[in-house]
């Protein structure tokens, strides 16, 4: 597929993902190491959106060029946190401002949801992503503990 010209990044539009986007979303998420079948992704997309999550798509020249999966985490003691579960931009469009525009659009949605702060997690090995988030005003805070539950 031909990559849009760099100047076209300013023409990006944002919308909620639909089931018709499943193959494009599966292709994007595979770029960050999570190969996923489009049919499986469709089921997950349906379940997540039914539960209140949003998958925000960056569309550029008629194609899905990136996406951000957004989740709202309520608390008893304060305003909810917004979480950017995943943010991916097509490889050929990185470092052209599309990621920044997508993150800003995600922040706007999370503000509309009443979130008091935004959390983004990123694997230790994703140093370029860490630099990007720091440039966008995010800072490292807490340690995360994970336990696999098994089947």
Image (spheres, rainbow, N blue to C red):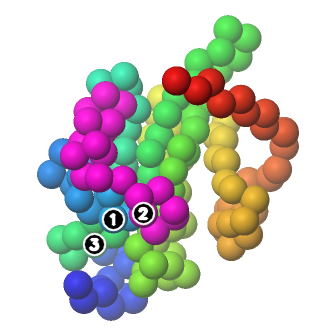
- Left-right relation of 59 to 151: left
Q: Which residue is mark 2?
A: 30
Q: Secondary structure at mark 3?
A: strand
The image quadrant where one finds the N terminus is bottom left
Give the quadrant of residue 129: bottom right
Give the spatial CA distance, label 1 vs label 2: 5 Å
Cβ–Cβ under 8 Å for marks 1 and 2: yes
Query: Circle 1 — which element?
Result: helix
Q: Tell whether position 36 is magenta.
A: yes
The residue lying toward the viewer, choosing from 108 and 125, is 125
Q: Secondary structure at mark 2?
A: helix
Structural crowding at the residue carrying mark 2, measured as other residues with C-alpha within 10 Å and reported as few (<14), some (14–19) or many (≥20): few
Write down the region rendered in magenta.
30-48
Residue 137 against residue 62 in the figure, above or below: above
Query: Along the polypeptide, which appears first: circle 2 or circle 3?
Result: 2
Q: Nearer the viewer, residue 103 or 24?
A: 24
Q: Which residue is mark 3?
A: 60
Q: Residue 30 at what x, y percent from top left?
A: 42, 63
Q: Nearer the viewer, mark 2 or mark 3?
A: 2
């Amino acid at each position: 597929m031909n990559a849009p010209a760099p100047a076209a990044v300013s023409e990006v539009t944002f919308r909620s993902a639909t089931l018709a986007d499943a193959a494009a979303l599966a292709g994007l998420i595979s770029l960050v190491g999570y190969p996923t079948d489009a049919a499986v992704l469709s089921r997950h997309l349906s379940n997540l959106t039914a539960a209140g999550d949003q998958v925000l798509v960056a569309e550029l020249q008629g194609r899905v060029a990136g996406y951000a999966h957004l989740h709202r985490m309520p608390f008893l003691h304060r305003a909810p946190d917004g979480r950017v579960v995943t943010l991916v931009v097509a490889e050929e469009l990185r470092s052209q401002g599309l990621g920044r525009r997508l993150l800003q659009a995600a922040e706007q949605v999370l503000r509309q949801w009443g979130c008091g702060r935004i959390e983004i997690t990123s694997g230790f090995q994703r140093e370029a992503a860490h630099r990007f988030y720091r440039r966008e005003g995010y800072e490292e805070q807490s340690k995360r503990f994970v336990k696999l539950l098994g089947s």
